[in-house]
C-alpha cells in the first residue's frame, strides 16, 4: 500500500492533546494515533450516510413493518457496521 505524505498545520495545544491522548491510549506515536482517528472518522461518516439512507427508505417498502421491527433492523445494520470498524 502506497503511503502519501500529508502536511498540515495544527495549534500547539491540539498537538499536545493528541500526544497526551496517544500516549495514554497506548499508541506508539502521534502518527499512528492520527491515522487511526482519521480512519475511524471516515467510517463514522459512512455509517451515518448508510443510516440516513436506511431512514429515507422507511415507508417505501411494499411490506409494512412495525416500529419495533424497524428498530431491530436498524440495530442489526449498526452492529454490522460497528464490527467492520473495529
Image (tube, rainbow, N blue to C red):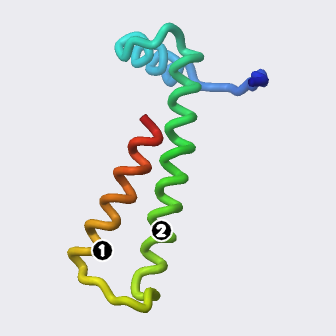
Pointer 2 residue: 52
- On residue 6, the disc is none
Quarter occupied by residue 63: bottom left
Quarter occupied by residue 71: bottom left
Q: x%, y% of residue 33?
A: 51, 21
Query: Closest to the observer: 14 or 39?
Result: 39
Query: Closest to the observer: 18 or 86?
Result: 86
- Residue at 34% x, 65% y is 74
Sequence-first disc among 2 and 1:
2
**6 on left or right of 84:** right
Q: x%, y% of residue 67?
A: 24, 79
Does residue 32 lie above or below 48 as drawn? above
Q: x%, y% of residue 8?
A: 71, 27
Q: Quadrant of the C terminus?
A: top left
Does residue 37 lie above or below 21 as drawn? below
Pointer 1 residue: 70
Comparing labels 2 and 1, the label whose residue is closer to the camera: 1
- Residue at 49% x, 21% y is 13
- Residue at 39% x, 59% y is 77
Element under label 1? helix
**Callout 2 touching callout 1 (CB < 8 Å):** no
Amino acid at each position: 500500500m502506497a503511503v502519501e505524505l500529508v502536511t498540515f498545520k495544527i495549534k500547539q495545544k491540539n498537538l499536545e492533546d493528541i500526544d497526551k491522548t496517544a500516549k495514554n491510549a497506548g499508541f506508539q506515536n502521534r502518527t499512528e494515533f492520527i491515522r487511526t482517528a482519521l480512519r475511524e472518522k471516515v467510517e463514522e461518516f459512512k455509517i451515518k450516510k448508510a443510516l440516513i439512507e436506511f431512514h429515507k427508505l422507511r415507508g417505501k417498502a411494499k411490506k409494512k413493518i412495525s416500529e419495533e421491527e424497524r428498530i431491530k433492523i436498524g440495530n442489526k445494520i449498526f452492529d454490522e457496521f460497528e464490527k467492520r470498524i473495529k
